[in-house]
Image (cartoon, rainbow, N blue to C red):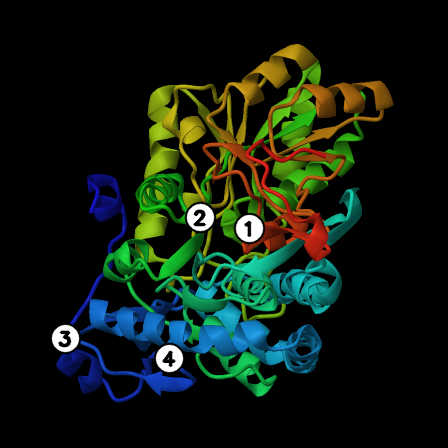
């Protein structure tokens, strides 16, 4: 195991005896070959981030557990590959129906374990369902190509075939959406799947896997294992796993990509982000301030597409900061399950400590804390960090250079459009960005010049709809294939080209030259 992967993937574990000693919190287990498995040597605690209370004990997979899941997937692969496309599509339609009819139930699970407010959890489900809808059209997406008479009496056609067993490793911040982005496409394309979600909020994924089986997915096609670095490393090292999809931090994305590709696996590994929102002098500042609040503090900033740096151009900075500050003061912070809450807690106590340390360091680095979320009146229990606004942030400060992944909005002032573009293009991350302007030429120039994978024009969070694909550039993506949508079908299939000829016996001859038309 590389030092980076070993150092970055970690978990707090305890013995089964300790886990079972607490009567109330249930044990959350794996689902392998359609059956639940709760046996484990190690468990980790699952918390409600709004209260800090333990809500479950998660069974962590051993190498043997992961191997059993891979074996189940491998055994199911031939039958699932041979299943007709119309039957695969029927599973997607039924899954969509199940999730849609019970989405309130799933949203509550997400909110209790991840912390985001119910409306945000509902939005996550909606965006996940977009890919289920897209995959329901798999009969179209799996079509190949045919060329008749490429040469005299010779035809050529290309087909798509599944890879086999694939692994999907998903993050804590979107415990339903990202799994639905990955596993639906992989399954629709005819693969069998090992799903390893974040150990911080696992219950939504258990719900989704059960929904898949209720929708008619055969046992063994989708297998769920919970775990830490041991599970991930096993998936990387096992030669039966043909591809790995990952969403998480850049250090882990880089480590997984490096190790897995060295073993000949296909990898798409989405990493961190530092998304900038440029506000031009001609922009509607009220609209820009609203967007900054929504994109910066939604889900407590725990989104890879969250706006973390506002870049006011020219002399509008003070006015824009005043508008943002005014709106921040009106936000309602509380448990995500409370319908009146607009922003919930961050995921763990460790995340809260790290975020507050970065705010403290910003002052030491010379930035100006305009609104300090640490001193706001917040719920006493749970892992809450108040929305924070920091001015005069420049590259070289930790608060600018690092992915904060919390409710912290930085302001980096620039004097010109060109300076704003240079600031963004010099950043190591290139996931998403936005510009707010009323001028079409400025918007077009921004779209043309910016070196970022997803761009918004007066749209602060430019997450593509399901018919397109999601992914950034630079240290935000390792691999050349984006997630969900058309590119995802490319990732989960390999193309086979067949050249055929049916000559008459008298046409056969020996020709040692290279074939031509």
- As helix, strand or loop, the secondary structure at mark 3 comes to loop
Q: Answer above or below: position of 434 versus 112.
A: above
Q: Which mark is residue 491?
A: 1
Q: Which one is in front, 504 or 52? A: 504
Asked whether the beta carbons under mark 1 and mark 3 sit within 8 Å of each other, the answer is no
Q: Position of residue 195 (x, y in %)?
A: 42, 66
- As helix, strand or loop, the secondary structure at mark 2 comes to strand
- As helix, strand or loop, the secondary structure at mark 1 comes to helix
Q: Sequence order check: which comes first, mark 1 or mark 3? A: 3
Rendered residue at 37%/60% (across/down): 241
Rounded to the nearest angstrom, the CA distance separating label 4 from label 1 is: 24 Å
Q: Residue beneath label 4, please?
A: 32
Q: Residue beneath label 2, please?
A: 266
Q: Is residue 107 left or right of residue 459?
A: left
Q: Answer above or below: position of 485 versus 193.
A: above
Q: Sequence order check: which comes first, mark 3 or mark 4? A: 3
For discs 4 and 1, the disc positioned in front in the rendered view: 1
Q: Which mark is residue 15?
A: 3
Q: Position of residue 311 (x, y in %)?
A: 61, 24
Rendered residue at 16%/75% (across/down): 41
Rendered residue at 19%/66% (across/down): 13
Q: Sequence order check: which comes first, mark 3 or mark 2? A: 3
Q: Sequence order check: which comes first, mark 1 or mark 2? A: 2
């Amino acid at each position: 195991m590389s030092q980076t992967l070993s150092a970055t993937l970690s978990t707090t574990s305890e013995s089964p005896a300790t886990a079972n000693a607490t009567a109330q919190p249930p044990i959350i287990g794996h689902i392998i070959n359609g059956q639940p498995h709760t046996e484990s040597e190690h468990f980790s605690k699952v918390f409600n981030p709004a209260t800090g209370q333990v809500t479950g004990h998660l069974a962590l997979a051993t190498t043997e557990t992961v191997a059993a899941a891979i074996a189940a997937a491998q055994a199911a692969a031939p039958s699932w590959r041979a299943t007709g496309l119309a039957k695969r599509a029927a599973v997607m339609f039924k899954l969509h129906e199940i999730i849609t009819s019970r989405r309130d139930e799933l949203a509550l699970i997400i909110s209790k374990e991840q912390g985001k407010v119910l409306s945000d959890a509902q939005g996550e489900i909606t965006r996940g369902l977009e890919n289920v809808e897209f995959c329901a059209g798999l009969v179209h997406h799996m079509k190949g190509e045919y060329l008749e008479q490429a040469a005299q009496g010779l035809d050529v056609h290309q087909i798509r075939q599944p890879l086999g067993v694939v692994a999907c490793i998903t993050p804590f911040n979107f415990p339903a959406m990202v799994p639905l982005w990955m596993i639906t496409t992989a399954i629709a394309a005819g693969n069998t799947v090992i799903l390893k979600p974040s150990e911080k909020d696992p219950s939504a994924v258990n719900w989704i896997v059960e929904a898949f089986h209720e929708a008619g997915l055969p046992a063994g096609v989708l297998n769920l294992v919970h775990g830490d670095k041991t599970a991930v490393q096993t998936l990387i090292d096992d030669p039966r796993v043909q591809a790995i999809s990952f969403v998480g931090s850049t250090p882990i994305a880089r480590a997984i990509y490096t190790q897995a590709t060295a073993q000949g696996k296909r990898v798409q590994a989405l990493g961190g982000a530092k998304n900038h929102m440029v506000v031009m002098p001609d922009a509607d500042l009220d609209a820009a301030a609203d967007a900054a609040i929504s994109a910066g503090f939604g889900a407590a900033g725990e989104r890879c597409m969250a706006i973390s740096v506002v870049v006011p151009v020219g002399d509008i900075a003070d006015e824009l900061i005043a508008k943002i500050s005014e709106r921040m003061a009106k936000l309602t912070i509380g448990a995500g399950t409370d319908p009146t809450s607009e922003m919930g807690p961050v995921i763990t106590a460790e995340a809260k400590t790290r975020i507050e340390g970065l705010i403290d360091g910003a002052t030491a680095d010379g930035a100006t804390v305009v609104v300090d979320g640490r001193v706001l009146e917040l719920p006493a229990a749970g892992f809450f960090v108040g929305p924070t606004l920091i001015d005069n942030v420049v590259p070289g400060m930790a608060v600018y250079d690092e992915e904060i992944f919390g409710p912290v909005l930085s302001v980096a002032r620039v004097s010109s459009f060109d300076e704003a573009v240079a600031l963004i293009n010099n950043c190591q991350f290139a996931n998403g960005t936005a510009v707010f302007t009323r001028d079409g030429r400025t918007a077009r120039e921004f779209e043309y010049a910016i070196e970022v994978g997803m761009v918004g024009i007066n749209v602060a969070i430019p997450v593509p709809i399901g018919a397109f694909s999601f992914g950034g550039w630079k240290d935000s993506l390792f691999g050349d294939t984006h997630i969900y949508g058309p590119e995802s079908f490319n990732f989960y299939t390999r193309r086979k080209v067949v050249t055929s000829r049916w000559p008459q016996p008298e046409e056969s001859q020996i020709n040692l030259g290279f074939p031509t038309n």
